[in-house]
């Protein structure tokens, strides 16, 4: 929850992407998920680390099954393979977009800080 204690601060992985240009944020978003997992494993309890490794294994299993079903076309499972592939590609795009979304939030925070206090009061009404 450090991200919410110090949003867009130096220790905030998502916040570091927000200060980059749009293309750097998009490229950084690709490795964002791995950075989040690495930090989570470093800061988690033993129980949560075990759950995280279980999640990694299940994700790997879904990706492996998807690729096997895509390569070895089985007529009855073709639609399942297409849905799984669509899901994986959508999630990859969503993860890559995190930096761009954080950049928008960063811009809003900077703009809000530059407004007069009375303007902020009126904008929240």
Image: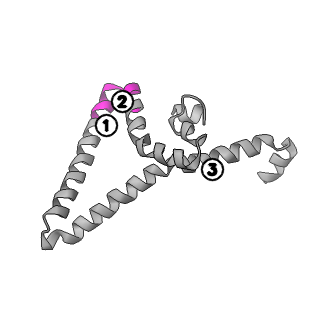
Dot 3: few (<14), some (14–19), or many (≥20) neighbours within 10 Å? Answer: few
The residues tagged by marks 2 and 3 sit, at their Cα atoms, a distance apart of 28 Å
Please identify the quarter of the rendering in which residue 39 is found.
top left
Please identify the quarter of the rendering in which residue 89 is found.
bottom left
Query: What's the mark number on residue 52?
Result: 1
Q: Nearer the viewer's eye, disc 2 or disc 3?
A: 3
Image coloring type: one colour
Q: Are marks 3 and 1 in contact (CB under 8 Å)?
A: no
Dot 1: few (<14), some (14–19), or many (≥20) neighbours within 10 Å? Answer: some
Residue placed at 41% from the left, 41% from the top? 31
Magenta-drawn stretch, dominant element (helix, strand or loop): helix
Q: Which residues are magenta?
A: 40-51
The residues tagged by marks 3 and 1 sit, at their Cα atoms, a distance apart of 29 Å
Depicted 47 relative to depicted 113: above or below = above
Depicted 67 relative to depicted 82: above or below = above
Query: What's the mark number on residue 104?
Result: 3
Dot 2: few (<14), some (14–19), or many (≥20) neighbours within 10 Å? Answer: some
- Whichever of labels 3 and 1 marks the residue nearer the N terminus, that label is 1
Q: Is residue 107 left or right of residue 44?
A: right
The residues tagged by marks 2 and 1 sit, at their Cα atoms, a distance apart of 8 Å
Position in image of residue 118 (x %, y %): 87, 45
- Residue tagged by mark 2? 41
Residue placed at 27% from the left, 47% from the top? 59
């Amino acid at each position: 929850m450090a991200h919410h204690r110090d949003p867009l601060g130096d220790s905030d992985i998502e916040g570091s992407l927000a200060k980059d240009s749009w293309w750097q944020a998009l490229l950084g978003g690709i490795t964002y998920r791995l950075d989040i997992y690495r930090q989570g494993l470093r800061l988690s309890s033993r129980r949560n680390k075990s759950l995280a490794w279980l999640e990694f294994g299940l994700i790997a299993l879904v990706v492996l099954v998807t690729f096997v079903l895509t390569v070895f076309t089985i007529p009855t499972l073709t639609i399942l393979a297409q849905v799984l592939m669509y899901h994986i590609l959508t999630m990859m795009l969503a993860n890559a977009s995190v930096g761009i979304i954080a950049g928008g939030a960063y811009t809003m925070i900077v703009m809000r800080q530059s407004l007069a206090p009375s303007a902020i009061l009126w904008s929240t009404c």
